[in-house]
Image: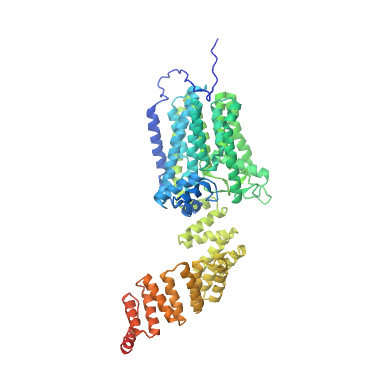
Amino acid sequence: MAKQKKKYKPNVAPIAQAPQREVQGEIKLDSSGLKIFLPIVLAVIVFICFHRVLQNQFLNWDDGIYVTSDPYITKLTATNIKKLLFENVTQNYFHPITMLSLAANYHFSQLKPEAYYLTNVLIHITNVIVIFFLTIMLFETMSEKVGYTRIRGIPWLAGLCALWYGIHPMHVESVAWMAERKDVLYAFFYFLGLIMYLKYLNEGKKKWMVYVVVFYIASLLSKPMAVAFPLSLFAIDILLKRENIRKLLIEKVPFFLVSIAGGVLVFFTQKESGSIAFLHGYTVFQKFSIACYGFMMYTSKAIIPANLCSFYPYPNLYQDYTLPGIFYIGPLAAAAIVGIPLWLSYRYARNYFSVVVFGLGFYFANLMFVLQFLSSGMTVMSDRYSYVAYFGLFFLLVWAIYQLYEKVPALRLPLQVVVIGASCVWGYVTMERTKVWHDSGTLWSDVIAKYPDQVEKAYENLADFYAETGEYDKAFPSYVELVKLHSKAPSIYRNLGNIYAMRKDYDQSLAMYNQSLKLDSLNFDTYLDLGVTYSIMGKPDLAIMNYNKAYHFDTASEKLLQNRAYTYFSAKQFALAVTDYNHLIRINPTPEYYFYRGQAEHNSGDFMHAIADYQKSLSMKAGNPDCMYDLSLAYNSVKDYSNALSFAVKAKQSGFKVPDVYIAQLQKSANSY
């Protein structure tokens, strides 16, 4: 009578390895050399593919709230660390570990982008190596302990899975965008948690489950997408044929409780920020079709990563309120992607079915919360959401290639060509894709090229990027396009009004300002810019009227007070100019403000106060020839000819063109006084 095979009980005791028949020419599974050599090779290849990321600049897409404008990462004080650990400082997600990592970057590198991006690349390379060992552990456990056919060349298979994960173009977004530090970081803890789970299953020691919990929580505190972690554990259970359902459920209860708490927190955080929409203007079936379309596109881009974009907009409805036809294909395609492999593998063998369920289950579990069944954000899909999910597909794909390679010898050469070709193409596309993320100009230009006249945010951010760098001629076409798109953002019309003003097209400028005020009649910046434009046009009364409206919203704006004081001065309203300079000096006592107040006092005939302010200005910033000359004039006005002559000479020596006649007159007056 044949000996009955023992059931797989990984959480009771370590499983003894079954004796295996030696296969001639087989690469040993415990080859320590390959386990050292291949990770080094992987690290080098991945670094080559991503090396251009080190030249990237910070982007005007969320990098501000995470790095460039975040006050809490600038100093590692107890107060700031407490804020980062326990408060949602980005008003986006609660991810304290991610924020602490960025604070550490700032501590050592301030705002030098290269150090931040190097950190991202190194974490990504580390993830690739972790996946290499995770895949080895999965294949070794399958091969040696749970009834799968013996798998040969496991390190090579793991190397291929890790390589494809590391160089896939869909993962560029997660590495090349600083706001997605959370992606690479949560994946690091996520995959380490899976390794600890395998250690627990193989050795049966509870300490490994403690590590699983620790890494899961760390992953969740890096990015909330880690809520799918318990489902990934179930996927591993299916792969390794664990059959005690009751035990599996009890085992996962703590994980699901944490996931539910994390999910509720994310939902309300996103709802408060306005990122959550239930239907987004679509019917329930249309939303379902859009979600299935997203699943279809994630899957197709895993194989053919073409037309990648940082922003995939929602589709516009036709006049009859229907979606473009391709979205209605989504449900059928999604059903085929899942159903056909499951049906074929189920008919073929249980082992095949278990691998397919694991691969597709892991993939779907880590995508399901971002498939836009419930709208979050403005895109129908995002490359970054594939960062963890694609491991399931790559594992399944490598397994399928291995089975064909072993069972159909005639396909070995074609399979080698396909694997090498796909790897080279993906690596090249990844290197090219990193160029797109170089700065805000390259990023948003790429979006506009792929979705012209569709993504308002792309035009807005591109225009703002060029405006901030002073390239107003490049910003102008994007602002004009935004007007054609009927943008509802007041800043668009205000910025375009500023450009028209710089071009001295004042009619268009005023029209844009008025449109901005129609959208937001309480906008401080619009009233300020309108005042500046009227001042340039030589209409001080209208300028002052708009400055006063702006002042109503912000009484401490240095820029406003500067401009209004200058306009008061130009309009010979010197007393009001002095009042604004008094306010400015209280806010920021600079030598310039003392000088300008002195000029206003001088022109109003208050020579003694003017002399005091000129002297104060020179004491703070010696060598200002304009101030010296004006001080000379003030002294001359009070008949202090000696000091008037002294400062006139100093002004001339400092480069001011003092009339010789004036100096001669002062010399004569000084001698005769």
Residue at the far top: name it: 1
Residue 339: percent from the left, percent from the top? 61, 32
What residue lies at 45% left-to-right and 37% top-to-bottom?
128
Q: Is residue 145 above or below residue 388?
A: above
Residue 348: percent from the left, percent from the top? 57, 24
Side (left or right) of 325 relative to 53: right
What residue lies at 48% left-to-right and 27% top-to-bottom?
139
* Front-most of residues 441 and 206: 206
Residue at the far bottom: name it: 672
* Front-most of residues 638 and 306: 638
User: Quadrant where the C terminus lies?
Assistant: bottom left
* Picture quadrant of residue 427: top left
Residue 392: percent from the left, percent from the top? 52, 34
Residue 397: percent from the left, percent from the top? 51, 32
Q: Is residue 352 visible?
A: yes
Q: Is residue 173 visible?
A: no
What residue lies at 49% left-to-right and 78% top-to-bottom?
574
* Picture quadrant of residue 511: bottom right
Side (left or right) of 358 relative to 658: right
Q: How many numbered discs?
A: 0
Q: Is residue 339 above or below residue 588?
A: above
User: Quadrant where the N terminus lies?
Assistant: top right
Residue at the far right: name it: 320
